[in-house]
Amino acid sequence: MKENEVSALTGRARRVQPFHVMRLLGRAHALEAEGRSILHLEIGEPDFSTPAPIVEAGRAALASGRTHYTAAAGLPELRGAIADYYGHRYGLDVAPRRILVTPGASGALQLVFSALLEPGDSVLLGDPSYPCYRQVLGLMGCNCVAVPLSAETHYRLTVEAARAAWVPGIRAVVVASPANPTGSVLSRSEISALHAFCRSRGAALIVDEIYQGLTYGIPDETALSVGCQDLYVINSFSKYFGMTGWRLGWLVGPEDAVEVMERLAQNLFIAANTPAQHAALAAFGDDAKRILEARRESFQQRRDRLFPALRELGFAIPHRPNGAFYLYADLPAHCGMDSMAFATGLLEEVGVAITPGHDFGDHGAARHVRFAYTRDLAQLDEAVSRLGAYLAGVG
């Protein structure tokens, strides 16, 4: 940098890391443009299109001119529909005024973090976990206290682990259930214990439920079932509802905090996408529910096909995950490379795209990769075949 030249970028901004998987995705697209066959098991996005009833509702909103700003907290009808959803599906009485509609779950995270944290505050979270937690917190000038998670505890953050890692200055704890990248699910009793522990330490508990609804063989629950008003729950229409590109999410929090976050939303976002909000009203209808449940069953079939196949190839996955649509796997012992090199070589040589563990933290990252079972059974079978061929040539 030349003398007297002013830098336009802050140190915080420069320190934000990209998704490593996005580099791989870009390379995958380049290979496809060259005519290569690429199997995409890297991106956490359902391969199904948005259900037709939701699309039709969005089209109708556009056709009728419902394209103006809504209130920053969201359409009253949608806040009410989300409240009804908690009532019908989980038997909970959640007041609409505790719900705020956001531009995706990412918008909800920013609002919750901004409302609860000051620069210099610390946040406890698991490692591995969703990378944007760390990046957004770093951009805000907050510190992350990472707790190593292992297969022995099904990659779940326990009270014992949180207590052992606790340091002064922690103002919040973030957990996800079901979790990315591991598919682990916290039980109601585990959420309740974590909440009680956080309350005893004067910290907030933030629960990311973006994969809620995508559970297999266990009850579909919400952290709100513990019955406490001081929880912060984040959700989205992206994963279970299949609306990734519509960029629509929501949060639930204490009423006074939601009032503050509404003011923040007015200044940060103005409001969430209006046609998307009208479209989302149809997500709770019976026609959409039938489609979404059929898709959930398809994800379970895919998990049950890919899980044993990967273990047969030598990937260590001690427990079959009960949620989301991911398998977080320890590389076969004989492969002789770290996860970044493995993912890069796998893509270049046999055209299978997966995510290296480096995207999700530091603990065991070099040994782990994530598979997204967001493709049909035929593509999963072909990916396993290519994986076997690749493994036969390494090590």
Image (cartoon, rainbow, N blue to C red):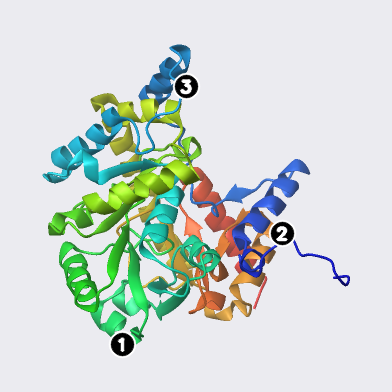
Say above or below: 300 vs 162: above
Position of residue 55 measured from the top left corner of the image (x, y, whole percent):
43, 24
Residue 328 appears in the figure: yes
Q: Identify the residue position indicated by label 3 in the image.
A: 67
Residue 348's disc number: 2
Distance CA(mark 3)–CA(mark 1): 50 Å
Q: Which amino acid, by three-letter code, is at mark 2?
A: Glu
Say above or below: 311 vs 265: below
Task: Give residue 284's quadrant in the image.
Answer: top left
Q: Which amino acid, by three-letter code, is at mark 1?
A: Ala
Question: Between residues 226 and 345, which one lies in front from this camera angle?
Answer: 226
Dot 2 lies on which element? helix
Position of residue 296 measured from the top left corner of the image (x, y, whole percent):
32, 43
Question: Between residues 74 and 147, which one lies in front from this camera angle?
Answer: 74
Dot 3 lies on which element? loop
Dot 1 lies on which element? helix
| Of labels 3 and 2, the one closer to you | 3
